[in-house]
Amino acid sequence: MPRLGSRVRIPSPAPATSKSLEVLAKPSKRRSSTTIVSTERLHNDAGRSASSPRKCSGNRRQVVYTRRLHNRPIGLCSKRGIFHYRRRVPTDLVTVMAQSEIWRSLDTDSYGMALRRIHRVAADVEAEFEKVRCSTGSVIDPVLLATPVSDPSRSTPLVPADPQPPAPPSPSNTRTIGDVYDRFIADPKHQWSKRTQIAHATTRKWVIEVFGEGTPLAEITREGCRDFVALLREMPKSAHQRFPDLTITEVIAAAKEKGERRVISTANLNAYINRFGGVMNWAMNEGYLDRNPLKGLKLRDPVKKRDKRNPFSIEQLRRIFDAPIYTGCRDDANGYAVPGDQRPRRARFWVPLIALFSGLRLNEICQLEVSDIRAIDGIPCFRVASGLSQTGDEKRVKTNASERSVPVHDELIRCGFLVFAESQRLCGETNLFPELPFGHLGYRSTAISRWFSRFLENAGAAAPLTCFHSFRHNFRDGLREAKIDRDIALLLGGWTTDGKGTAVADNYGSGYQPKALAEALNAVRFPALNLDHLAVIGSRRET
């Protein structure tokens, strides 16, 4: 013990070691352990050689210093495998040029070639900026407006008061509408059906006739696009089929001469605008165009989407299923509307019934194979899928959500559908309805769609805004009246809530079991419609 009044020496603190500093640097458990990162980026935009990158990192919880060196020139971007030059429009020119960025295609997928071309394109863009400043009376830099002379070491400045002819345009500015349209159609990412291919070919034909195949893409103005839309508004229905050898102006003149008043609907007109606008958007993404002159030119459709099709009324359904083909006809070919003692049960008999009680689309029904009628967990179901059939033919669906399994309704079973499917299997048939041929667009539904229109007239069931697709409206109303859960209803009908497909949540879980779907489907009833005359005694419930 030290004596009273004596001095007590307090030891000096030990020097801080790296270990002790590390302990002190550790954050409290109650605090966030976010790492503080300090980054310094050096862009070697002029292509200068740089020293090897240095990256120092200690403990993850300590401060980390990173130094990154980028050798790629400013503005060099790659889009779909093609290199482009991207430049932000200076702030003082954004309002004048009505755009915030400039994109120029370098027309090459070679990185080395892009490095050689980008400087020329960048110089052209800077010269364009100076010309715009010159036109607005702003202060300019004459050096940026200089044009090359014979001696590479000298240059002659371009005097704003006496402008010289503009420099040759870059390759992206010389693209013609015909060339760009062909590049768009040949893009491998476009996997269109034959129907869509024909629609794009028709649109291209009319666009080329109006604007000219050799017209530079940059010269297609908004006024010219408005004139194109005005021509479409006078286009008669089915013009590409009725007048295949005439130009768009000749078609309109011929229709007026015949007194034709039926023109294409607003929905079809907007479809042509969408296809042409899609080409222009593609050209913008490729750097061939700065603005889409078609943007905002679509017309407002006076017919609401809900009013484009109506469900069949109960009286129409009665007339349909009391027609001779369901009660007795001469045959189901040319004599389908003539009363007789024959009751053939083939495509013309089953397709409308399946549509009413399953909600399947017309082509989904027509392309069914015998193997698509299968039992899942003991529940007989329709399998709707795309891909190649057993005969090597292509099967199509409208959307990704269209691929589904739909239980066979009890009413179809009561009418003997499973017996029919089994008989087709025993006969060695591959297609459920082998008598349906492929149409010119590759769909088995083409012929029966035309037949059904005549059938409605002969049965006295035709009415405005109703067609075969009205069966799906009846099915949807049946789901509503049965108070079926919305998710199950959308799944049974192959509907999506928007154009982007199913929601993220739909990718979770294994989905609804066939038993639950069958219970929901069989809740769909049409009590005012009596189909007892179609019932088959002793029809089996399994396949």
Image: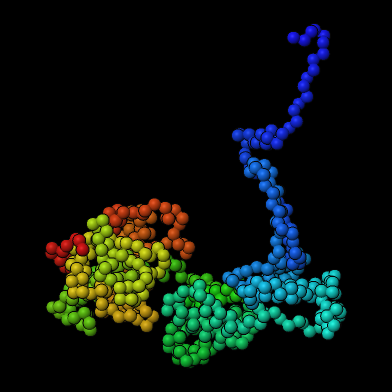
Residue 279: x %, y % from top left: 56, 76
Q: Nearer the viewer, residue 488 or 65?
A: 65
**Depicted 454 relative to depicted 33: above or below:** below
Indicate left or right for 225 with 393 as reference.
right
Q: Quadrant of the N terminus?
A: top right
Left or right for 258, reference 273:
left
| Residue at point 65%, 68% (across, down) | 77
Whether 410 is drawn above or below 335: the answer is above
Q: Check the image and name the residue furthest to the top.
A: 4
> Between 368 and 452, which is closer to the camera in this rendering?
368
Q: Quadrant of residue 309?
A: bottom left
Q: How many marks?
A: 0
Viewer-nearest residue: 539 or 295:
539
Residue at 21% from the left image edge and 63% from the top image edge:
543
Q: Is residue 463 left or right of residue 87?
A: left
Where residue 508 appears, as percent x and y from the top left, is 42, 53
Q: Where's residue 25, x and y in %?
A: 68, 36
Image side of residue 182 versus residue 385, left or right = right
| Residue that appears at 33% across and 58% down | 479
**Coordinates of residue 310 in the picture (x, y in percent):** 36, 68
Can residue 349 be seen at all in this image of the molecule? Answer: yes
From what the image shows, is residue 110 above or below residue 485? below
Query: Do we see residue 273 in this rendering?
Result: no
The answer to which of 145 and 501 lies nearer the viewer is: 145
The quadrant in which residue 462 appears is: bottom left
Residue in the picture at 45% in, 89% down: 244
Colour scheme of the rendered structure: rainbow
Query: 432 above or below 262?
Result: above
